[in-house]
Image (cartoon, rainbow, N blue to C red):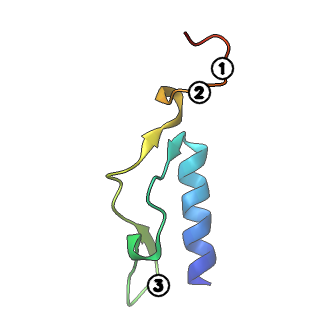
Amino acid sequence: SILQRAVDSAQEINKWGIVLGDRAPRNVAVDQTSHQVFLVDFAQCFFRDTMFDPWDEDTE
């Protein structure tokens, strides 16, 4: 289904270390002919390796 492909795409992006900050249906585009799913609007994304973890004891 289209919904499952959108979820799979978001999970794949997360595997690359990118955290999507605005996961919403409005940020999914679907090609009318091929039904290919595209995630759009990465303005609020973060790279996991640059995020601050307040519980990390090594961080001061």
Secondary structure at badge 1 equals loop
Secondary structure at badge 2 equals loop
Marks 3 and 2 close (CB-CB < 8 Å): no
Q: Position of residue 35 (x, y in %)?
A: 46, 84
Answer left or right for 36 relative to 12: left
Answer left or right for 47 relative to 53: left
Query: Furthest residue to the bottom?
Result: 33
Q: Position of residue 34 (x, y in %)?
A: 44, 85
Binning the other alpha carbons within 10 Å of mark 3 as few (below 14), some (14 to 19) or many (20 upward) gives few
- Residue matched to label 3: 35
Identity of the amino acid at label 1?
A: Asp
User: Which of marks 2 and 3 precedes in the sequence?
Assistant: 3
Marks 1 and 2 close (CB-CB < 8 Å): yes
Say if 3 sits above or below 57 in the image.
below
Identity of the amino acid at label 2?
A: Asp
Say if 57 sits above or below 50 in the image.
above
